[in-house]
Amino acid sequence: MPGEPDIATVAQAIGEPARAAMLLQLMDGGEHTARALAAVAGIAPSTASSHLRRLGEADLIEVTDAGRQRLHRLAGPAVAQLVEALAALAPPRLPDRFQPDPPAGPLLRARVCYGHLAGQLGVDLAVVLREDGVVGDLAPGETSAVRTFDHPVLAALGIGELPGAGPAVRACLDWSHGTVHLAGALGTALLTALLGTGWLRRRPRGRALRITETGRRRLGELGVG
């Protein structure tokens, strides 16, 4: 019979401020060099390699070679869910030198959560789509299909179908608001479309997103927020 899972190994890998800051940055769903992650964590590039190796040994990140660069990314959605769940239990912020994002306001309003939209805007969209019957009531971690694509928000964003792989909808616990936002294929499609329309813009650093004036106006017209 197998023994209990060794959660201490994973907890020890995460439980260091520089490594935690790196994981939070990787929650943007992108790939980053060790130098870029070192800058986020406020440590020397030479020190970053040992931290990244520790995260890799715990199967929290993956590394790929791109020419002369080595790029680091989260090992998958399960790791992103773990980081988001820990964030929901954590104190409000890391020490300043380990804080990878802009001031809290933008981060709480709209941010990337491993390929989908989080923050107040993500929560607002989830509420509208749930109340209008596009998705059902879901507890964190639960999945479902999209009930209908006949909705003004989806029409305005050009979302009429989703890829077949993976869950169409997954409820992801939003650490900053204590309720769920939408992940899965629908969550990814919403973020991609919002960026594509220019209603949202990426900021130069961190996961926080900027809601443009056009975005505020159009989302308001659609009853979001």
Image: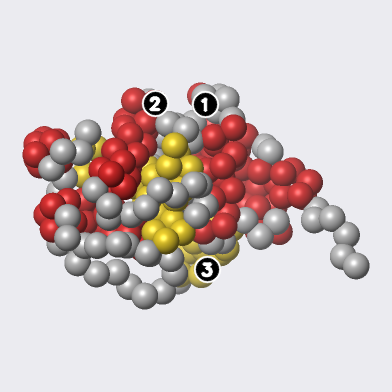
Residue 83: x, y in percent? 56, 45
The amino acid on which the numbered mark 1 sits, given as a three-letter code, is Arg
The amino acid on which the numbered mark 2 sits, given as a three-letter code, is Ala
| Residue in the picture at 59% in, 30% down | 90
**Helix, strand or loop under label 2:** helix
Q: Residues within 10 Å of mark 1 (few under 14, many from 20)?
A: few
Left or right of residue 141, residue 224 in this image: left
Left or right of residue 54, residue 21 in this image: left
Picture quadrant where residue 4 is located: bottom right
Q: Which residue is mark 2?
A: 104
Q: Are marks 3 and 2 in contact (CB under 8 Å)?
A: no
Picture quadrant where residue 101 is located: top left
Q: Which of the two discs, 2 and 1, labels the residue nearer the N terminus?
A: 1
Residue 59: x, y in percent? 66, 60
**Helix, strand or loop under label 1:** loop
| Residue in the picture at 43% in, 42% down | 180
**Residue 220, can we see it?**
yes
Q: Is residue 105 above or below residue 187?
A: above
Q: Which residue is mark 3?
A: 64
